[in-house]
Image (cartoon, helix red, strand yellow):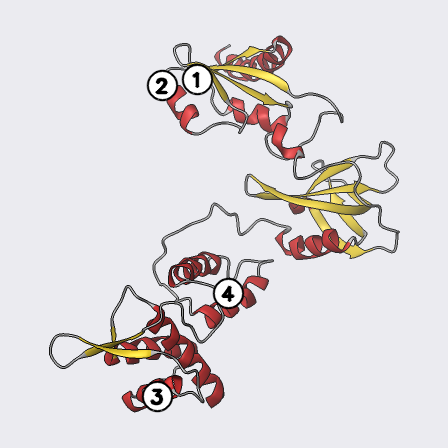
Amino acid sequence: MSANKNAQLRYQILDRCFSNFKKKYTIDDLIEEVNEKLYDMNGIEVSLRQIREDIKFMRDRMGYDAPIEAYPLEGRKCYYRYSDRDFTIYNNELSTEEVKNLSQTVNILRRFRGVPSFNWIEEVVSNLEYRFGGKTTQENVISFDQNERLRGLEYLPTLIEAATNHQTLRLLYCSYKGIEHDIVVFPYHLKQYNNRWFLFALEKNKKLPHVSTYALDRIVKISNDDTEYVPNTEVDFSLCFEDIVGVTMTAKRGTQPERIVLRFSPGRFPYVVSKPLHPSQQIISEEDCTIQLTVHPNPELRNLLFSYIPDIEILEPQWYREALKKKIEENLKKYLNDEA
């Protein structure tokens, strides 16, 4: 790092110290603060003389004309602070508290460093660290429920770029039955659900053209295609997930969501109230432990409801109750056969 860049970084660190009205920085504190930040970035340390020279330069009219004042403490020590609370040598438009919150965000972003497909975060975090001095913390205070070994994550940047720039793609896609299909798609949207990523796209030459869902872990290969891109005119992705659980859109356009009435056991009901199954959840009766959802039934909803067995009963609509009852009976036969 050049000497001039080092100086600018020192001024930036000192500026934050002088702007912090919650802490009193003595000259020793300033040296420690500057050294800590500089050493983290390039292993450089500064002396008392250098910090005094920096303060002198910042005060000078040829420098920043900064209103740095020395306020007495007990004994012969003093602390340094701007006399003007609104002064800063940089036009950040960020308060000390906002910078602190930003630093916490930087620490969260660091958790993605090294994760496949998130290499772009390296540059973002580095820029934030340099610009706002986000300090690296060794404490692991947050975790994400993320499957870093999931196949297909390496395609995420390509798909995001294609959807953003309206680029047609050719996919070699493997179905759940193990059959590979060579298809041309127009990518529109990506969504994460249950630790998996899904692409929403229109497939070229499909007999019933509509937006389909493709799991990234089923993609074998991606390449660009010269087919003219077909813009999305079918799905409003800012609204389409409001009436479903997960990512599978099975309802026809214009179809109204169903009112699903559920009853839970008294022991499980408080948990469901504290952690709603869906944003549309409403309590019908606390005494009867019943709630309702307003959603389009899909496989993800069925799987979610089955995860609450034996503490759940589907009350309405009748057709949905019968459909899930049939699934339960089919599964139960496997256990009854063991007893025969």
Numbered label attached to residue 267: 2
Residue at the disc numbered 1? 311
Eye-nearest disc, 4 or 2 = 4
Q: CA distance from mark 1 to mark 4?
A: 45 Å
Q: Earlier in the sequence, mark 1 or mark 2?
A: 2
Kind of residue sitting beneath label 4:
Val
Q: Earlier in the sequence, mark 3 or mark 1?
A: 3
Q: CA distance from mark 3 to mark 1?
A: 72 Å
Kind of residue sitting beneath label 2:
Gly
Q: CA distance from mark 3 to mark 4?
A: 32 Å
Q: Earlier in the sequence, mark 2 or mark 3?
A: 3
**Marks 4 and 1: in contact by CB < 8 Å?**
no
Residue at the disc numbered 4? 125
Could you say whether the residue bearing mark 4 is in a helix, strand or loop? helix
Q: CA distance from mark 2 to mark 3?
A: 69 Å
Q: Is residue 167 left or right of residue 155?
A: right
Q: Residues within 10 Å of mark 4 (few under 14, many from 20)?
A: many
Q: Earlier in the sequence, mark 1 or mark 4?
A: 4
Q: Earlier in the sequence, mark 3 or mark 4?
A: 3
Residue at the disc numbered 3? 56
Q: Residues within 10 Å of mark 1 (few under 14, many from 20)?
A: some
Could you say whether the residue bearing mark 3 is in a helix, strand or loop? helix
Residue 244, image quadrant: top right
Q: Position of residue 56 (x, y in %)?
A: 35, 88
